[in-house]
Amino acid sequence: MRSHLIQRLLKGLLWSAACWVCLPAIAAPNLLIIQTDEHHYNTLGCYGGEIVQTPHIDRIAREGALCSSFYATTPVCSPSRGSLVTGLYPHHHQVVQNNIPFPDSTVTFASILKDQGYRTGFIGKWHLDGDGKPQWEPERRFGFEDNRYMFNRGHWKKFVMVDGEPQVGGKDNKGRPNYDLDGADATTFSTDWLTDRAIEFIDTSRTDPFCLMLSLPDPHGPNTVREPYDSMFDNVEIPIPSTIRKPEAQIPAWAPTEAKVTIATLRRLMPHYFGMVKCIDDNIGRILKTLEDRNRLDDTVIVFTSDHGDLCGEHGRLNKGNPYEGSARIPFLLRYPAKVPNGTRIDVALSCIDFMPTVFSLMGMRTSNAFDGRDASQWFQGQKVNNWNDMAFLRSTTGQRWLCAVSNRYKLVFSKNERPWLMDLKTDPEEAFNHIDNKSLSPVIRNMTQSLLDYCTAEGDPYGQIPEIRNAMFKQLR
């Protein structure tokens, strides 16, 4: 562990030195991160979605950059969020599964920006302070100075203010907070209410540059949404994934199908899922208009992403937690016209750990803090990066225990209870088959396996020491 800490410190010092050499002095831009929860990338028009019209999210992509292969470092809420805000792998920031609290010493991007004069805030779901639910305004702020509207856990549908304090508006018959809509409208529905608080934050950030993270709890279940979004997609033909039912031989141990997921299930759940996405897009439109009206749009780095995806019936499953595209691949858009050309498309594999070094570089931000991620800012500036290793590394929670190497085209998974699994996203975009026995792909398999072994050594990932995983990797290199 000590050697890994030294390596991280050296990486941080080298990264900081490079920033001092090559970054010109520019006015400090604002930073706005909008993160949704359990959001399938393909519901967005900019990612090819055709059912929900998402013009405001699409605008961020059109006037900025779109990552085609951005992944949740661990496709579960807390570990993914932890990696985004620290730039570290989950086994380094220590939140390796849900409901584990951050260590007190954790440094986030907000900690760094606050120390450099930014007004910092967090609005919405945090999910990095343990079991507290909803737990408004956690005592430990981790750099987010204004966290009045931060709540630790839950997918509440209605919020209200009572005596100047935020509360969950949905209540059961004993007065306890629940996930019911409870008559939520455009002023109290969670997405609208949190967006109102974000607009207030922007409006009161008049002098110092601001850093705001808006964390929306939708479109995570329960699949309910306020009027008129609740009926907007009632007559839509719900797409049924071809992989909703597969032969037993094509079902890996790390993603068994769920009997409850049927065509009828999807026809019942998906219209409201689409409604939640549409509500999110409309509210992002409100934020963009606010920034535009205040002449702050172009001096704000705007990031749109999610913590993980939702399989939405793919592979006979809902939700997340495995390396399939619907679960692990997430939208990642960035608008900053001072540095990022319109319509930039980044076709290399990146993950949550790459956010901090990349966005800090684009912002001209100098720091000696060490990150596990890479600075991909040149890609965002429309430049091709020579000798870039197109590889990102994903890991499971402590349940199934799998490791995954992913490139823009291939995905290789090693797990404790399953043979190696190779996906070819070009020839088999639905990931219906295991291509590990395809001899023509042997060079790809060897390269990805070696990269995964190198990652385990460099980053000290304990999963690399699990005998079944380690032996399977060495077998592929013979």
Image (spheres, rainbow, N blue to C red):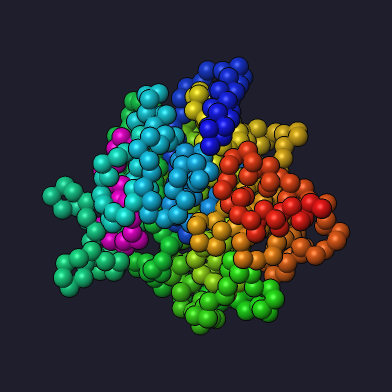
Task: Place residue 206 in its image quadrant.
Answer: top left
Q: Nearer the viewer, residue 329 or 159?
A: 329
Q: What residue occupies the far left of the structure in this picture?
A: 163
Left or right: 241 with respect to 117? right
Image location (x, y in percent) of residue 416:
61, 61
Give me the residue at 45% from left, 54% from top.
97
Give me the residue at 74% from left, 52% from top.
474
Above or below for 99 versus 254: above
Dominant secondary structure of the residues highlighted in magenta in the image: loop
Q: Is residue 335 visible?
A: no
Q: Is residue 28 visible?
A: yes
- In magenta segment, residue 374: no
Above or below for 37 versus 455: below
Image location (x, y in percent) of residue 350:
62, 45
Give me the residue at 69% from left, 65% from top.
419
The residue range painted magenta reads: 144-159
Task: Place residue 357 in its image quadrant.
Answer: top right
Left or right: 148 with respect to 65? left
Task: Place residue 175 in its image quadrant.
Answer: bottom left
Q: Nearer the viewer, residue 324 or 184?
A: 324
Image location (x, y in percent) of residue 35:
45, 49
Image location (x, y in percent) of residue 38:
47, 59
